[in-house]
Image (cartoon, rainbow, N blue to C red):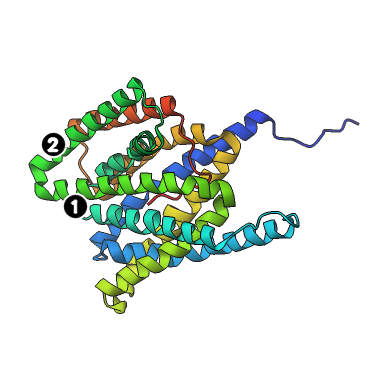
């Protein structure tokens, strides 16, 4: 009689699992614009949808963070520096307001004026601003290849912008400006978040950051809407649930798992599939136009971002929650 040993995962299996998680995470993040657009169609504005995102997602992130803190505190060496200080907590709260309130508000608001696919392509360029901030404030080197990559991507954005602007007018300019500003703010968030994540860990940082952004979003909502606006139509409840889970919580942990298995650089490169997913859903679900101008523009944006990512090798935070 022969016996078989239990199956074990080799390195290639873990690598494929990491790639699968990266693709799944990027694809789920790509649904955000689609859900917001569907909510707008149902008569739910961007601020209300963002508020529901926080109501659904924040308790989950906070629960994970509390469990992570308890786990680390139980094994924390006596006499070592504390896991958290008041200064660290306040910094994380402030950075969270920047990334998950302001950047998210700008991005969600942009979707009231431009297509989901165009919004996604502009937001995809935020690593350019990360490097720009690094060059300006930290004297980091910027190569000719990185500049060329940015130029290629922005030519692609200009092609789509010109086509959409010629048909839809000033709304496109306003929407592009809003999501462009969101990309700038999110890049600043990335720069400020990195040392905090290195110090306290991604799960704990995200919990604290979301704890700061959640109340900020709710305060904004109450200042601009009657509380009764949270009572969305019955058919739209699944959209509010989806924006908090499918488009936020699940992809965040998929990306975190992918980074742990294949590293941040590969995960960043794989993440470039997200515009393709957004475009496919925008055309198939929302009925958005995809013209030759969109095809050329999208190809140039992706080419520039992939070239830039491979050259710059950015180290992403260990947990990635998009604005």
In the figure, residue 248 lies in which quadrant? bottom left
Q: Nearer the viewer, residue 72 or 236?
A: 72
Report x, y in % for residue 124: 34, 39
From the viewer's side, name the closer residue of 44 and 213.
Answer: 213
Residue denoted by label 1: 113
Residue at (41, 62) in percent of width and height: 213
Q: For numbered disc 1, what is the local secondary structure?
A: loop
Residue shown at 34% from the left, 62% from the top? 50
Q: In which quarter of the image is the N terminus?
A: top right
Mark 2 highlights which residue? 162
Q: Where's residue 13, x and y in %? A: 64, 32
Q: How crowded is mark 2: few (under 14 residues within 10 Å), some or many (20 or more)?
A: some
Q: How many residues crowd around disc 1 within 10 Å: few (fewer than 14), some, or many (20 or more)? A: some
Rendering coords of residue 116 (x, y %): 27, 47
Q: Are marks 1 and 2 in contact (CB under 8 Å)?
A: no
Q: How far apart are marks 1 and 2 (CA)?
A: 15 Å
Considering the numbered disc 2 on the image, is that residue within a helix, a strand or a loop? helix
Residue at the (33%, 43%) spot, across then down = 278
Q: In which quarter of the image is residue 280?
A: top left
Outermost residue on the top side: it is 144
4 relative position to 148: left or right: right
Using the rendered image of the protein, determine whether residue 35 is visible from the camera's viewpoint: no
Q: In which quarter of the image is residue 5?
A: top right
């Amino acid at each position: 009689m022969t016996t078989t040993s239990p199956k074990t995962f080799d390195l290639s299996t873990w690598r494929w699992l990491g790639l699968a998680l990266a693709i799944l995470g990027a694809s789920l993040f790509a649904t955000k614009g689609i859900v917001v657009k569907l909510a707008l169609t149902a008569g739910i504005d961007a601020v209300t949808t963002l508020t529901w995102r926080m109501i659904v997602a924040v308790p989950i992130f906070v629960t994970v963070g509390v469990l992570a803190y308890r786990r680390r505190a139980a094994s924390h060496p006596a006499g070592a520096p504390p896991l958290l200080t008041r200064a660290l907590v306040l910094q994380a709260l402030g950075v969270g307001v920047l990334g998950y309130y302001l950047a998210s508000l700008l991005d969600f608001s942009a979707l009231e004026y431009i297509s989901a696919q165009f919004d996604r392509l502009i937001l995809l360029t935020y690593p350019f601003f990360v490097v720009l901030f690094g060059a300006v404030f930290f004297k980091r080197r910027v190569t000719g290849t990185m500049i060329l990559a940015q130029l290629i991507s922005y030519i692609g954005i200009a092609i789509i912008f010109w086509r959409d602007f010629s048909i839809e007018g000033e709304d496109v300019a306003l929407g592009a400006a809003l999501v462009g500003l969101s990309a700038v703010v999110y890049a600043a968030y990335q720069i400020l978040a990195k040392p905090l994540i290195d110090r306290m860990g991604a799960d704990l940082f995200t919990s604290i950051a979301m704890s700061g952004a959640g109340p900020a979003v709710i305060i904004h909502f109450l200042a601009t809407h009657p509380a009764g606006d949270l009572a969305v139509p019955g058919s739209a409840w699944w959209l509010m649930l989806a924006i908090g889970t499918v488009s936020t919580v699940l992809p965040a942990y998929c990306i975190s798992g992918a980074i742990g298995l294949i590293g941040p650089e590969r995960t960043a490169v794989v993440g470039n599939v997200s515009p393709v997913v957004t475009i496919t859903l925008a055309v198939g679900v929302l009925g958005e136009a995809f013209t030759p101008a969109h095809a050329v523009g999208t190809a140039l944006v992706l080419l520039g971002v992939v070239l830039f990512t491979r050259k710059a090798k950015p180290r992403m935070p260990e947990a990635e929650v998009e604005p």
